[in-house]
Image (cartoon, rainbow, N blue to C red):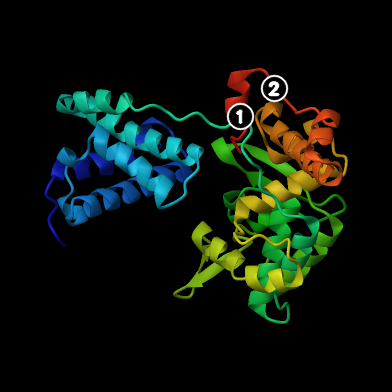
Amino acid sequence: MARVKDETLFSLLRDFLIIYLPNQRKCSPNTVKAYRSVWNQFLKYLSEENRVRITEVSFEMISREAVNGYLAWLTEKKKAAVTTKNNRLAAVRAFIDYASACRPEYISLSSELAAIKIQKVVRFPKLDYMSEDAIAALLKVPDTRTREGLRDQVFMIFLYDTGARIQEVLNVRLCDLKLGKAPTVTLFGKGRKVRIVPLMEDTVAHLKNYLSVFHENESIESREYLFYVIRKGIRAPVNDDTARIRLRKYVEPAKALCSDVPDNIHPHLWRHSRAMHLYQHGMDLTMVSQWLGHSNLETTEIYAYADTEAKRTAIQRAMGSKTAETIVPKYTVSDEDLLRRLYGL
């Protein structure tokens, strides 16, 4: 194994991820994983910019200019949204702040990075969601005569019906399912919050068929993961990267059935889609908020805004933009602090 040039950088980074975040900050495994991903990406960026191996990256290469360059690279190469760049900046700063608390010589670097301005987020970011026709097309594609097709179809049905975040779905164990007269699933969400979500009758039928194949003769009280992979003969939970790859493989064949199917299918798109469809079919926004597990009702108001804008667009197409603008007033919220929280899904 190659020896690192700056042992201080990598030892502090290891302690930050392994000790400080989980033990002192009490961050969830998903939060720690997010910080680790940012720093893996940032270190790779620094190594390429300085034309050195990652093991040769040092604190000397980290500066205000380097971080600004990284943020610009995220915009140009990765087409990252403002919220994504702000999150990346926060992760970089968090470690440098930790490093400066451990080693006073990095206090000036911490102050330098603090001067980088957080970009303003659009008041109501564009909300992507799929049409109900697109959902139906995607669910038709898997060949359910095969184990893989059955698994993938049920995974998509479960993702859509629950409106759960991807990690919430991947964390579900058999004992979290209650498939009796009032079927539900218990989800363990962000911030270790727990909520119980009802399951629809059709979903339960698909689940029971899936269980008969993938969990044959297993107790419903088992702590085995609902969705799993087998590695070296041992069951293991599916990771989110694998789940994303599974979803993307059905995009092209589904587009042949329905032109509404978007090019980029990702897990959170199913959550947005389900919430929007429930709202469009008349579910009260308060109920949608509780169902999604939002801490504040304000977070859910993005669906009301997106639906209003969809109606505005339809009217503009039918009657002309000037008339439509008069008929449908824009949805506004005055509290600026509230608006900054609206996309915290």
The reply to whether callout 1 and callout 2 are in contact (CB within 8 Å) is: yes
The residue where tag 2 is placed is 333
Decide which of 147, 35 is in the foreground and name it. 35
Which of the two discs, 1 and 2, labels the residue nearer the N terminus? 1
Where does residue 205 sit, x and y in percent of width and height? 82, 65
Where does residue 181 sit, x and y in percent of width and height? 88, 53
Residue 250 seen: no
Q: Callout 1: 10 Å neighbours few (<14), some, many (20+)?
A: some
Where does residue 333 sit, x and y in percent of width and height? 70, 22
Under mark 1, the amino acid is Arg
- In which quadrant of the rendered view does residue 257 lie? bottom right
Under mark 2, the amino acid is Val
- In which quadrant of the rendered view does residue 335 lie? top right
User: Which residue is at 70% across, 69% downward?
Assistant: 255
Decide which of 152, 79 is in the foreground and name it. 79
Q: Callout 2: 10 Å neighbours few (<14), some, many (20+)?
A: few
Q: Is residue 127 above or below residue 121?
A: below
Secondary structure type for disc 2: loop
The residue where tag 1 is placed is 123
Where does residue 294 sit, x and y in percent of width and height? 67, 34
How many numbered markers are drawn?
2
User: Which residue is at 34% across, 32% downward?
Assistant: 94
Q: Is residue 253 above or below residue 33?
A: below
Residue 13 seen: yes
User: Which residue is at 51% across, 72% downward?
Assistant: 230
Secondary structure type for disc 1: loop
Cα–Cα gap, marks 1 and 2: 9 Å
Decide which of 311, 118 is in the foreground and name it. 311
